[in-house]
């Protein structure tokens, strides 16, 4: 039985975007004069906010506790 891949949470998407922008800036330092360095700040602030919001975080990876199993 195959599991359907779950959709990414908002937090996971923001972290991916942060990684992509950071990688781009690392490969092309001349872009630091552009607004991409400001994008890093905006993304980091959005990530901090998403970590505080239960709706924007990914669901727990462990199954919910079910006392009736045993």
Image (cartoon, helix red, strand yellow):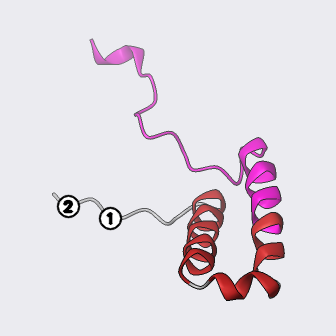
Residue, disc 1: 4
Viewer-side residue, 64 vs 15: 15
Is 47 situated above or below 38?
above
Residue 16: image tag: none
Farthest residue toward the front? Answer: 30
Left or right position of 31 against 7: right
Dot 2 alpha-carbon crowd within 10 angstroms: few under 14, some 14 to 19, many 20 or more: few
Where is residue 47? Give x, y as percent: 73, 55
The magenta-colored residue range is: 42-70
* SS of the residue under disc 1: loop
Where is residue 29? Give x, y as percent: 64, 81
Residue, disc 2: 2
> Which residue appears at 64% of the width and 49% of the height?
57
Disc 2 to disc 1: CB gap under 8 Å = yes
Left or right position of 37 against 2: right
* SS of the residue under disc 2: loop
Where is residue 23? Give x, y as percent: 55, 73
């Amino acid at each position: 039985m195959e599991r359907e891949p779950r959709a990414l949470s908002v937090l996971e998407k923001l972290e991916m975007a942060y990684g992509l922008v950071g990688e781009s800036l690392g490969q092309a330092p001349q872009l630091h004069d552009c607004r991409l360095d400001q994008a890093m700040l905006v993304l980091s602030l959005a990530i901090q906010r998403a970590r505080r919001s239960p709706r924007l975080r990914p669901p727990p990876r462990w199954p919910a506790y079910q006392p009736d199993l045993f």
